[in-house]
């Protein structure tokens, strides 16, 4: 997210307490754009979350597979790759412009997520407008909307 400091209360524990997976984190950058430093910070949280998952934590010798797209930071941050390697996380890079064909998320879950996102954005705008006569949604409101979207995902999906 954009900025140098997270709003008070928006901790990793807050995210997990509200239904997000272990390893979920908010990382701040100057322009809200993924940088190499941000990718390393994200990697530390995500890998820790992977290793704490049910079944995985009980089987420390297991290797995991992580699928990533070809975003530059995913490939060029050596420390993030070494971290994954040391924690038995193998990385597989998807070819560019194939996610709409190959990723299970894009095949099914994304459609439902987009429908829920539209609904929750509309509801948030309506509520903001009633309270302040303006429909301004900041990045922290988007985090809360994201949490609602994740919580709406059905187990069978």
Image (cartoon, rainbow, N blue to C red):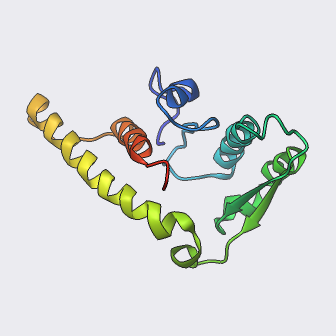
Q: Count how many numbered circles sit on residues in the image.
A: 0
The answer to which of 112 and 124 lies nearer the viewer is 112
The residue lying furthest to the top in this view is 8
State the residue at coordinates (38%, 64%). 111
Q: Is residue 148 above or below residue 85?
A: above
Identify which residue is drawn at 43% across, 62% down.
110
Query: Whole-percent x and y of residue 24?
Result: 58, 38
Residue toward you, 58 or 32: 58
Occupied quadrant, residue 134: top left
Picture residue at 82% right of the left edge, 34% below the top: 58
Q: Where is residue 71 shown, x and y percent of the image?
A: 64, 65
The location of residue 64, given as percent across then percent down, is: 79, 52
> Residue pushed farthest front?
156
Q: Is residue 95 above or below residue 35?
A: below
Q: Is residue 35 left or right of residue 77?
A: left
Q: Position of residue 131 (x, y in %)?
A: 12, 28
**Who's the residue at 44% across and 26% down the image?**
7
Left or right, 86 with respect to 72, comes to right
Left or right: where 104 falls relative to 53: left
| Nearer-the-camera pick, 132 or 67 | 67
């Amino acid at each position: 997210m954009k900025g140098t400091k997270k709003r008070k209360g928006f901790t990793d524990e807050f995210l997990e307490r509200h239904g997000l997976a272990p390893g979920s984190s908010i990382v701040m950058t100057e322009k809200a754009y993924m940088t190499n430093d941000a990718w390393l910070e994200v990697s530390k949280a995500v890998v820790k979350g992977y290793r704490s998952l049910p079944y995985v934590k009980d089987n420390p010798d297991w290797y995991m597979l992580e699928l990533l797209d070809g975003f530059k930071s995913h490939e060029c941050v050596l420390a993030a790759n070494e971290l994954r390697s040391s924690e038995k996380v193998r990385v597989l890079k998807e070819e560019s412009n194939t996610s709409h064909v190959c990723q299970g998320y894009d095949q099914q879950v994304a459609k439902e997520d987009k429908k829920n996102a539209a609904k929750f954005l509309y509801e948030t705008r309506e509520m903001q407008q009633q309270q302040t006569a303006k429909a301004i949604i900041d990045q922290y409101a988007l985090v809360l909307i994201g949490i609602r979207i994740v919580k709406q995902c059905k187990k069978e999906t």
